[in-house]
Amino acid sequence: MKKEIYITDYNCVTPLGFNVETNWNALLEGQTGVALHKIIKDQNAFYASMIDSEKLNKEFSENFKNQDFTRLEKMLLLSLKPLMERHHITAETAFILSTTKGNISLLKNQTALPESVYLSTLAKKIADFFGFKSKAIVVSNACVSGVMAIAVAKNMIRAGKYKDAFVIAGDELSEFVISGFNSFQAIGTGPCKPYDKNRNGINIGEAAAAVYITSAPSENEKFRFKVLGDSAINDANHISGPSRTGDGLYESIRNAMTEAQVSAEQIDFISAHGTATLYNDEMEAIAFNRMKLQNAPLNSIKGYYGHCLGASGLLESIISMEGALHNMLIPSKNFEETGVSQPLNIIQANRPAAVRYILKTASGFGGCNAAIVLEKC
């Protein structure tokens, strides 16, 4: 019999708040973190979702004495601290960091690579601060990193490598990231509109998120979500463009649902990637229809948070679980008229719903795709 793996705790730090409760209440009210921000000198402002640095520094000062941390490190530490106060670390506890760029801002105006820009150094710094005894693990696979980090934790615990794990994810807005996406004209001219006929690109966002995963939940846990299945498939379609036929995403979903032993009819909610680019949203619609999931309620929360890169999959999983706990599905913000060729059941208003099975998907550069199935216990 396979060992059962559970998510029993989580937290997040975003432009909408520094804990899950604040974020959830903001989402219920339809609030968004996406706004115009001046990010690159001598260029126009971009629509993006950015944490207020003054509020971030104030919150960090109230929780930590040592101030010798980068902006991203502060986000990561704040997201993880509440979980560390509720759960114990042993030599068999894993620490997993999901990020795509890490401390990329440290490269500005540098002629040599600072040590802190290495992802392994970032992971070790956060792990050492909280006293983790195992070697820190980094999951950095484009925009599927957050979803894959959950899968890595689940599979390592099931294999007996660890007994539990803290998974943390984070990325921040930077000139480097904005310039990169802007160079191939992927950034939207307004707030992003996933799956909408008038969508024209993404909004970049920033966030940090953390979850606690275990095979032996204590009796006083407030909730439990079982990680039933996972899969990650790379269709190697293109360095930046998604497969037109959705092959990798389709295979990822199929494998995850097969492992979970859950049918398309049983999926109560899909938390999709939904970047609001022309080809990504179309590819997802094709893949979901190939899996007969076109009737499952679906949303993208990129309209609230923007695309948070390596943090997106973990943050979106947390919001999905919170919605299931509240028996509430939130709308895919800014969606008005279908702009994909295949039918999807896109949520357009706050909708009460009994949610047991959640499908979370993600796709990214290089043809990478990932999916996990969660069950509310």
Image (cartoon, grey):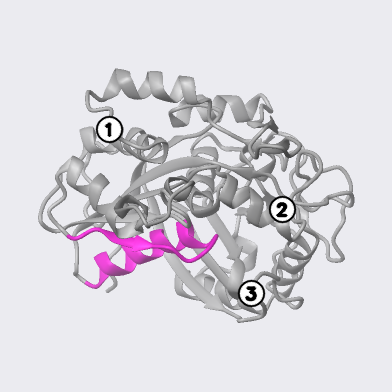
What residue range appears in magenta? 135-159
Q: Is residue 274 visible?
A: no
Which label lies toward us, 3 or 1?
A: 1
Q: Which of marks 3 and 1 is nearer the N terminus?
A: 1
Q: Classify mark 2: helix, strand or loop.
A: helix
Question: Residue 250 colored magenta?
Answer: no
Q: Earlier in the sequence, mark 2 or mark 3?
A: 2
Q: Are marks 1 and 2 in contact (CB under 8 Å)?
A: no
- Location of residue 130 in the rendering, given as x and y in whole percent from the top left corner: 19, 41
Q: Residues within 10 Å of mark 2 (few under 14, many from 20)?
A: some
Q: Are marks 2 and 3 in contact (CB under 8 Å)?
A: no
Which one is in front, 163 or 242?
242
- Location of residue 64 in the rendering, given as x and y in whole percent from the top left corner: 25, 25
Question: Residue 137 colored magenta?
Answer: yes
Q: Classify mark 3: helix, strand or loop.
A: loop
**What whole-number distance in Å separates the C-alpha atoms at marks 1 and 2?**
32 Å
Q: Residues within 10 Å of mark 3 (few under 14, many from 20)?
A: few
Indicate left or right for 373 with 214 as reference: right
Q: Can residue 75 be seen in this view?
A: yes
Quadrant where the image shows the N terminus: bottom left
Label 3 sits on residue = 239
Which residue is drawn at the image coordinates 44% and 41% (left, top)? 208
Tell me the kind of residue under disc 1: Asp
Q: Classify mark 1: helix, strand or loop.
A: loop
Label 2 sits on residue = 182
Indicate left or right for 189 with 229 as reference: right
Tell me the kind of residue under disc 3: Ile
User: Mark on residue 68?
Assistant: 1
Which residue is drawn at the image coordinates 35% and 66% (left, top)? 152
**What whole-number distance in Å separates the C-alpha atoms at marks 3 and 1?**
37 Å
Which one is in front, 53 or 319?
53
